[in-house]
Image (tube, helix red, strand yellow):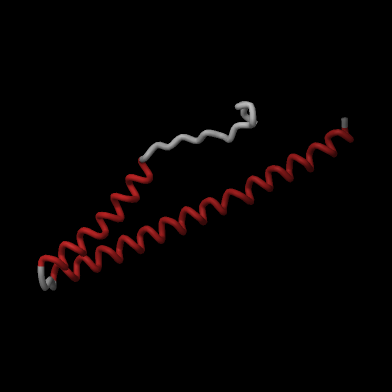
Amino acid sequence: MIGLGALVVPLFLWRVGARRAKAPRARVHLVSLAGRVLFNAALVVVVQWVVITHREGPWLLLAVLGVPALFASYTLTKALTVTSYEPPQGRRGERR
């Protein structure tokens, strides 16, 4: 029993360490994505604010408000569209 425990415990500790090593990476990517989203949103707001307060004509205002709306609508449509995944089938139609 001691010999079996000596084999199982290092394996268990290795798996726990591997799981912990993966966890911080997911957080880093989330923070990085959130930072980029906030930066881009702030950039759009600043440009819109400058154009609205110092506007020269209606076409520039329409462009500054319309182009980000197009990007946002495309992103939302892509994110909310449900697609299905069908795995590839073999020669006789069976799944692998």
Left or right: residue 53 compared with residue 36: left
Q: Quadrant of the N terminus?
A: top right
Up the image or down, 45 lies above or below 77; here it is below
Q: Quadrant of residue 34?
A: bottom left
Q: 94 left or right of 42?
A: right
Residue lying at 13% horizontally and 73% vertically, measured from the top left: 54
Q: Which x, y percent locates residue 11?
A: 77, 41
Seen in the image, is 38 located left or right of residue 16?
left
Between residue 86 and residue 72, name the one nearer to us.
Answer: 86
Residue shown at the point (73%, 45%) measured from the top left: 14
Q: Is residue 86 left or right of residue 77?
A: right
Q: Relative to the observer, which residue lies in front, 28 or 77?
A: 77
* Residue 42 coordinates in the image, percent (x, y): 30, 63
Quadrant for residue 6, please give it. Answer: top right
Above/below status of 91 relative to 23: above
Figure quadrant of residue 44: bottom left
Q: Residue at x 32, y 50 (%)?
A: 74
> Which image quadrant: the C terminus?
top right
How far across and how far down the image is residue 18, in percent? Answer: 68, 47
**Along the line of sight, which residue is nearer the eye, 74 or 9?**
74
Q: Where's residue 46, x and y in %?
A: 25, 67
Quick one: 96 or 11, which is closer to the camera? 96
